[in-house]
Image: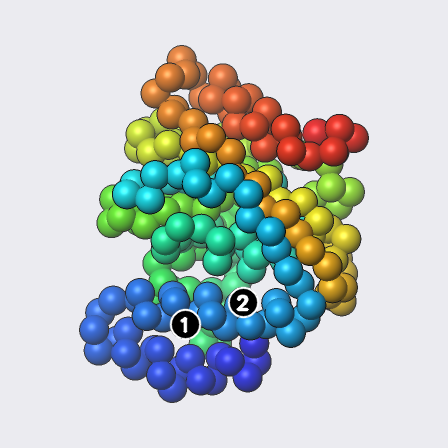
Amino acid sequence: MLLFLPVGALIAFPWTLATGKADFLYKFAMKGVKTALRIAGVRATIEGREKLDRSRSYIFMCNHVSNLDAPIVVPALPGRTSILVKRELFRVPIFGWAMRMASLVPVDRSDRESAIASIGRAAEVMKAGLHMTIYPEGTRSVDGRLLPFKKGPFHLAMDSGVPIAPITVVGTQNMMPKGGIRICPGTARVIFHEPIDSSRFKDRDELMEAVRASIASSLPAELR
């Protein structure tokens, strides 16, 4: 990736600035991510993606146990997505600029007002036709068990009317657990579940439980 970023700076960034569109930058980045994973010996099997309607936008919600989750899941999505990203990462030279150009949304989890503003920004991004990918646990799980969900993403779903597409990722914890810096070769499973229409639920808590049950359904019993 360190070799790939300068190439992106020379080719993809100028093209994006000239056209005002980030599609080429996004495809270029996905190609780089896939190549990096292959070099690291990381593979993924994709299940259930045919359940999605490719003509519409979704809020993808996924469990989170590893820094490999996003590089594995995002290229598997049907179309371009935005992501809620820790605000600190936007300070990284080149990388932060690329994330802004790709309409990724910064979030400061320590500041409640900032977090609420980020949810509003996510709604604007979806109105532009992008998917949104969110980890409802808010952070990586240390032991792989599904953590309590944050409420903000479910406010976003109910207010926007965009359906939620739950995803379960299995196997990334063994390849790169939280706190680890070494990537071990292996194969992850990315499982897409039936989309959930938020309008069918009377309140946010009921919607949250339905999404949690869907994601948990493909986890080993001890991690649910």
**Mark 2 secondary-structure assignment:** helix
Say whether residue 187 is left or right of residue 211: right
Amino acid under disc 2 = Lys
Give the alpha-carbon distance from disc 1 to disc 2, as whole Å: 10 Å
Is the Cβ of the residue at disc 1 closer than 8 Å to that at disc 2?
no
Image spot of residue 71 (x, y percent): 56, 60
The image position of residue 108, as x and y in percent, is 50, 50
Above or below, comparing residue 79 to residue 95 in the picture: above
**Residue 28, numbered circle:** 1
The colour scheme of the drawn protein is rainbow
Q: Residue drawn 45% across and 46% down?
A: 133
Residue located 61% across and 67% down the image: 37
- Amino acid type at circle 1 is Phe
**For the N terminus, which image quadrant?**
bottom right
Residue 10 visible in the picture: yes
| Residue 63 % position (x, y) | 60, 41
Horizontal side, residue 188 vs residue 34: left or right: right
Residue position for label 2: 34
Farthest residue to the top: give it: 202
